[in-house]
Image (cartoon, grey):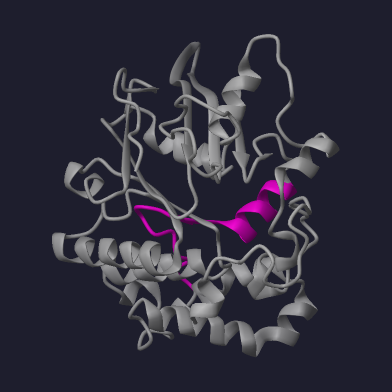
Amino acid sequence: MSDRLSPCEPDSAGRPMDSPLHFSPDAPAGPLLGGGADREGGLDQRRRAGTGPSEADSDGSATARAALLGEEAGGEAGGHLRGDPPAQLSAVDLKKNYQKGPVVIPVLRGVSLSVREGEMLAIVGKSGSGKSTLLHLLATLDVPDAGEIYFDGQRVDHLAGLERDALRNGYLGMIFQFYHLLPELTTLENVLMPLMIGENVWGYVRRRRQLRQTAAGLLEMVGLGHRLRHRPRELSGGEMQRAAIARALVGNPRILLADEPTGNLDFASGREILELLHRLNAERKLTIVMVTHDPSIAEQADRTIRLVEGQLEPGAGPARL
């Protein structure tokens, strides 16, 4: 199992270091599905191809993008200091409004942040501060009204719908407070669902045994090896969240985005889920971005940022690790 879940080494399969990322809806997602050849890429070639950050911008936003992406030679940006490795995930000046009848409600008012590979970042704030909205934008489940999002230096917020689907299925894992398991499917089938989506019918039939073994192995890893044939109604809250984590991991994602992963659990179950997330972060070097309202949970992360009325808390930028 460790080989499947470990982050890909840039040259482990002889892939060129400067090959661009491709989020093709026709390509299988992730190394588990044979699509690993596209997963590594360098910023220089993307710049030459015109898919990376622009070199100049009259309003100075290019400088902010460069700093957040780890290209700026000096100063602080997004909580990271000179000499830090490039950001794996970055947001630049994100803004998002919602409309309720004639009233426009601003939710995010210009949020910039950067996340390094292997980092566990907690996003905290009061209800309505924009935490979940920010996470959904980072996951490309929604699009910002203004601002930009970069993954491995490549802009992703403006991708077409099918390309965003391919990005999520191959690179991003997502877990929610309310699990979102399909009630008519078994635990094993719920975990298999992203792999079924990532394959065409004949591809899935041909690789069915291997994919089922992968999903069953993940369920064993999260402590549900004895629950493969149970449906969600037969599982406890903690077990459903473990199944949701296994489902999020089955595509071998580079980043795990978690929205209040313990918010619907009792204390003991919540502690078990947090221990599992920390183990994944420590042993698999999996980048985790987690929204929580619980300060005691946030304290366990490597770094914490606080949202206040849709903005990062003034004077309390994220500290360097």
Left or right of 161 on screen, residue 72: left
Residue most toward the right?
Answer: 49
Instruction: Classify residue 132 by image quadrant.
Output: top left
On the rendered image, what quadrant is the C terminus found in?
Answer: top left
Q: Which residue does the image show at 48% across and 46% down from the upper left?
A: 116
Residue 29 in view, yes or no:
yes
Instruction: Give 205 or 90, whichever is nearer the viewer.
Output: 90
**Residue 43 on the magenta span:** no
Residue 145, visible in the rendered structure: no
**Residue 55 at x, y percent in the picture:** 74, 24
Q: Which residues are magenta?
A: 162-184
> Percent from the top left, x then y, of residue 209?
63, 90
The answer to whether residue 182 is magenta is: yes
Q: Quadrant of residue 298?
A: top left
Residue 240: image location, x then y, percent: 35, 68
Asked if residue 28 is positioned above or below residue 57 in the image, the reply reads below
Which residue is at the front of the view, 23 or 280? 280
Q: Position of residue 277 (x, y in %)?
A: 34, 62
Say which residue appears at 15% left-offset and 65% top-offset.
268
248 versus 202 height, above or below: above
Q: Total marks drawn?
A: 0
Q: Is residue 133 left or right of residue 317?
A: right
Residue in front for this viewpoint, 216 or 156: 156
Query: Looking at the picture, does residue 240 appear above or below residue 203?
Result: above
